[in-house]
Image (cartoon, rainbow, N blue to C red):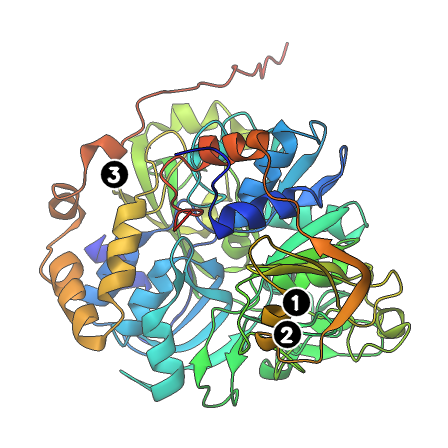
Amino acid sequence: MREAIARFAPDGATIALGTCLEPAIPFAAGHELIRQGRRDLTLVGPISDALFDQLIGAGCVERVVAAWVGNVSEGLGHAYRRAAEKGEPRPIEIHDHSNFSIALALWAAAWNAPFIPTRTLLGSDVPRGNPGLQTEQGWVRVLPVKPDVTILHVQRADAGGRAHAWGPLGITEEAGLAAERVILSCEELVDAEVTLSDPNRILLPDAKVAAVVHEPGGSHPAPLQGYWRRDHAAHREYAGRSRTAEGFAGWLREWVLDVPDRQAYLARVDPALRISRHRYSAQVDYGDE
Amino acid sequence: MAMSEYTPPELMVAAAAREIADGELVFVGMRLPVLAYGVASATHAPHARALFELGLMRDRPAEAFLGTMGDPPNVAGALWATRMSNVMALMAQGMADLGFIGGAEVDRHGNLNTSYIGDRQRPDVKLPGSGGGADIAILSRRWVTLMNHERRRLVERVSYVTSPGHGDGSAGWRQRHGLLGGGPTAIVTTLAVFRFPPAGGEAELASVHPGHTVEEVRAETGWEVKVAAGCGETAPPTEAELEQIRRLDPDGFWTGGKR
């Protein structure tokens, strides 16, 4: 993870994260961005659970292009509030979207289209704060949003960059297709034989994938279907401690800065959060003659 | 504790559940509406289906507690797991009968603010933003909002419209501006239920929750409250509704508090 972030997610990059909405959020990658002291990032996402708040609080972020920033089960994002209201630890620029419009902005970039027309956001003030949303008579022009890098956490991937992901995908496909490159982190690193046995399930073309990181537990405290339940208590703890800048700093030291890597982090996570009741799908037949 | 005692959020969930008619496709949203769908599905609306913006459709509530719509029990047993654009496509085609949106601030025309309190450049409070709220407000056939009833939240005119309701309240405002759906039909608060006349316009007090009064509602509302003809008491949650709420939220994560 250290190498992937160092090589492919530089200062000033536009990074899409948390594209499945609540599940499969690449928290491990986000924490590595913080540890490496990234600055001036533009974050792109739909609703973003606490990871955007953490990156903002750590001072990594210059601009947010998103529909929602907070803590889904707890409410307000306190670090986001401090940045927007007081410019602490640094001012941020906010480009508001709705969930639908950020999806369309990424599809526009994925399709290399100049814009996508939509009827969502008519009558809303959301376009007022975003030069990428232009209201016409009866429709709204959504301009492309192109990430330099999209970071995803998936159930399994092979070393050649073929990922299998399942469960709701949110805006993952458009964020991956639109991006210059993709960093994958995965619960399981598998042989290409496994991924290629089910090509319909391959998330993105391998040519987009610049790095594959085997990072079990890489989504904690967000859930991952088949592997991890959501850690509601961790979200609650973060919400409580991040209410003040001092509390946030203490949380950040304890859970990010003083933790060398995800393995050390996972040693502190309740093992009961691992999913134990498995529900396998039926196999499919790709028979050809 | 007797089943007939209940918390304010439990009453709100029951009231929200009753907004769902059998067979409807409901764009569910976050928090209390997730429970409202579960209650409706298990009581009067067994054929109601749920759409979740992250890319899910269900025909029954999850078997376990949900902190978010993306928790694994909400995916297991789903009718469809897909991408967000696909569920937005259904809503854009007018297939979502009803949506729910949480609000931080609402005005008498049903416009919601979940973005900025105060100046946008330097807000007094930066709220999380639209999420899918604006999309639901514009594209679903009708929608309902749930919120705490406080004078600072129910205001004459929101300073920022995240999710448009009936605009300035003039007849045909939504059609004139190209909004596809019919807009808000009700506001369910911790004290009362407001409803909008069929043509839109201004919220009218439709019922007051047990233990509260019209005077209290007036005092806690930032606009001159219009009381609808036939305004009475909100029906308390039934035993069956409470049973479902407590099955779906056994530790009171969403609906806990003083009964």
Which residue is the site of mark 3? A216
Which residue is the site of mark 2? B218
Q: Relative to the observer, which residue lies in front, B164 or B233?
A: B233
* Relative height, residue B115 to residue B102 (above, below): below
Question: Is residue A26 rendered to the left or right of residue A98?
Answer: left
Q: Distance between the residues labelled 2 and 1?
A: 6 Å
Q: What element carries label 3?
A: loop
Q: Relative to the observer, which residue lies in front, B141 or A281?
A: B141
* Relative height, residue B32 to residue A130 (above, below): above
Q: Which mark is residue B95?
A: none
Kindly tell me whether residue B33 is visible in this rendering: no
Marks 2 and 1 close (CB-CB < 8 Å): yes
Q: How crowded is mark 1: few (under 14 residues within 10 Å), some or many (20 or more)?
A: some
The residue under the point 56% across, 69% down is: A145
Q: Distance between the residues labelled 3 and 1?
A: 56 Å
Q: Residues within 10 Å of mark 3 (few under 14, many from 20)?
A: many
Amino acid found under the numbered disc labelled 2: Arg
* Relative height, residue B165 to residue A153 (above, below): below
Which residue is the site of mark 1? B214
Kindly tell me whether residue A247 is visible in this rendering: yes
Q: What element carries label 2?
A: helix
Amino acid found under the numbered disc labelled 3: Pro
Q: Residue furthest top?
A: A289
Q: Relative to the observer, which residue lies in front, A208 or B35?
A: B35
Residue A272 x, y percent position in the rendering:
23, 31
The residue under the point 84% across, 78% down is: A137
Q: Is mark 1 on a helix, strand or loop?
A: helix
